[in-house]
Amino acid sequence: MLTMILNPEVICLGGAISADQSVIDLINTKFHTIQQPFSALMTTELKTCRFKNDANLIGATLFAAQQFHIKGVN
């Protein structure tokens, strides 16, 4: 598991999967079951993206705005 090797601070779950809380709960349960024996070494948290299913649209919009040099977009 890459999480054991890389030990990222946070893994963000976005897109359609993040809109279904039951799926997020299942992923969290499975992740913590795997993480438990290595809890001293693995400190990764699972979080849902703030914009959930719209994150990809917001990112694409910002990218396009930057490509076309639209003012007010950083």
Image (tube, helix red, strand yellow):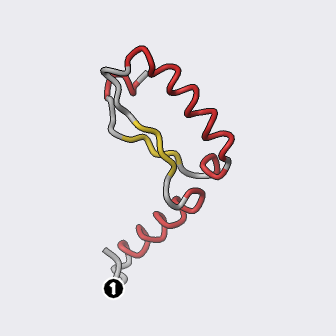
In the rendered view, tell whether residue 6 sits above or below residue 11: above
Q: Where does the N terminus fall, quadrant-wise?
A: top left
Front-lying residue, 57 or 67: 57
Drawn side of residue 57 relative to residue 44, left or right: right
Residue furthest toward the top?
37
What residue lies at 42% left-to-right and 70% top-to-bottom? Answer: 62
Residue 29 image position (x, y, % from top left):
58, 29
Residue 2 image position (x, y, % from top left):
40, 25
Drawn side of residue 18 relative to residue 68, left or right: right
Quarter-of-image position of residue 10: top left
Front-lying residue, 67 or 52: 52
Secondary structure at badge 1 equals loop
What residue lies at 38% left-to-right and 17% top-to-bottom? Answer: 38
Label 1 sits on residue:
71
Residue furthest toward the bottom?
71
* Callout 1 amino acid: Lys
What residue lies at 43% left-to-right and 40% top-to-bottom? Answer: 11
In the rendered view, tell whether residue 70 sits above or below residue 55: below
Residue 65 image position (x, y, % from top left):
41, 76
In the rendered view, tell whether residue 30 sits above or below residue 12: above
Q: Residues within 10 Å of mark 1 (few under 14, many from 20)?
A: few
Number of marks in the image?
A: 1
Q: Where does the C terminus fall, quadrant-wise?
A: bottom left
What residue lies at 46% left-to-right and 45% top-to-bottom? Answer: 12
Residue 49 image position (x, y, % from top left):
49, 53
